[in-house]
Image: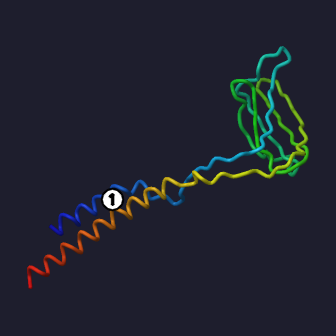
Amino acid sequence: MLKKISALIALIIFSLNNFAYAHGTGWREVELKAAALEFLYSDGELMSYCEAKIYSPRDDKIAFQTMRTDELGRVAFVPDQQGQWRVVVSDNQGHRAEAKINVTQNLNNNLNNNNLISQQDIYIRAVLGVSLLFNIAAIILLRRRKAVNN
């Protein structure tokens, strides 16, 4: 019986090896003050799915964020400091639009940590719970075996 339990424990441990991550991941909902812009061609057509680069006041050479405009030609980002931000949108066909916006708003963002639980935490809790049950079962079986042998 003990061999069967040991084999079952080994099987469970080896089947969970896909969940052995170096880092856990999680998410949380945040209330952020975003800057949003819409980019258009001169005829009013939206600049959909174009490359967008956002430059902070701190560094005008390396992009703070890179992305694509959405279907409606929009870009949104969350500035981390006040000052003049530059947004450059290019369709890689010779059209380029550049916007400079001044961020003067209060940048204190409120974080909601209610949902901050990682997938790894869930698996660790599950494995620990199963391990606890198997340890209790093993102790009971070992005590019964000792009682029978005495």
Outermost residue on the left side: it is 149
At 54% from the left and 55% from the top, the residue drawn is: 117
The N terminus, quarter of image: bottom left
Front residue (pair 70, 53): 70
Q: Where in the figure is residue 9, as x and y percent of width and height?
A: 27, 63
Q: Where in the figure is residue 119, as x and y percent of width and height?
A: 49, 53
Residue located beneath label 1 in the image: 14
**Residue 34 drawn above or below residue 149:** above
What kind of element bears circle 1? helix
Left or right of 48 on screen, residue 35: right
Q: What is the crowding at mark 1: few (fewer than 14 residues within 10 Å), some, or many (at least 20)?
A: few
Front residue (pair 144, 58): 144
At 65% from the left and 51% from the top, the residue drawn is: 112
**Residue 85 drawn above or below residue 125:** above
Asked which colour scheme the image uses, the reply is rainbow
**Mark 1: amino acid:** Phe
